[in-house]
Image: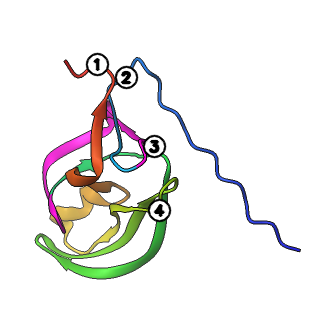
Amino acid sequence: RHLSPRTFRSYLPRSHRTYSCVHCRAHLARHEELISKSFQGSHGRAYLFNSVVNVGCGPAEQRLLLTGLHSVADIFCQSCKTTLGWKYEQAFESSQKYKEGKFIIEMSHMVKENGWD
């Protein structure tokens, strides 16, 4: 009988400002990993992150986005399975290559936690 692998949630240090899933509060990213706040997701504003935690990745597919053709994979919260945004796998225009390997999370799926006052 095949057992599915167990998934362990990562916890980011309390001393860091973090972004968490608004639906289940799983940690998603540290503020230090934020690259840009000026992105557009499918459902409104989105942030670009260098790295994220507690997310799963779907299969890559080509999509025509506002900035051109990209190969992207949807990302979802490992805890509650909500689709959060996408990962840029490949950019086909040289001016967009900086996005490769980076992650988009839509603001509607994130909440800020720890020391934002």
**C-alpha distance separating marks 4 and 1:** 27 Å
**C-alpha distance separating marks 2 and 4:** 24 Å
Viewer-closest of 24 and 83: 24
Residue 90: x %, y % from top left: 34, 70
Identify the residue under disc 1. 115
**CB of mark 3 within 8 Å of CB of mark 1?**
no
Give residue 14's quadrant in the image.
top left
Badge 4 marks a residue whose secondary structure is loop
Q: Give residue 81's mark.
A: 4
Quadrant (top left, top right, bottom left, bottom right) of the C terminus: top left
Residue 97: x %, y % from top left: 25, 62
Residue 73: x %, y % from top left: 39, 71
**C-alpha distance separating marks 3 and 1:** 17 Å
Residues rendered magenta in the picture: 24-44
Q: Give residue 16's mark.
A: 2
Viewer-closest of 26 and 104: 26
Picture residue at 19% right of the left edge, 69% below the top: 42
Residue 91: x %, y % from top left: 27, 70
Badge 1 marks a residue whose secondary structure is loop
- Return the disc, 3 or 2, that comes first in the chain's sequence: 2
Identify the residue under disc 3. 26
- Residue 32 within the magenta-colored segment of the rendering: yes
The type of residue carrying mark 1 is Gly
- Return the disc, 2 or 4, that comes first in the chain's sequence: 2
**CB of mark 3 within 8 Å of CB of mark 4?**
no
The type of residue carrying mark 4 is Lys
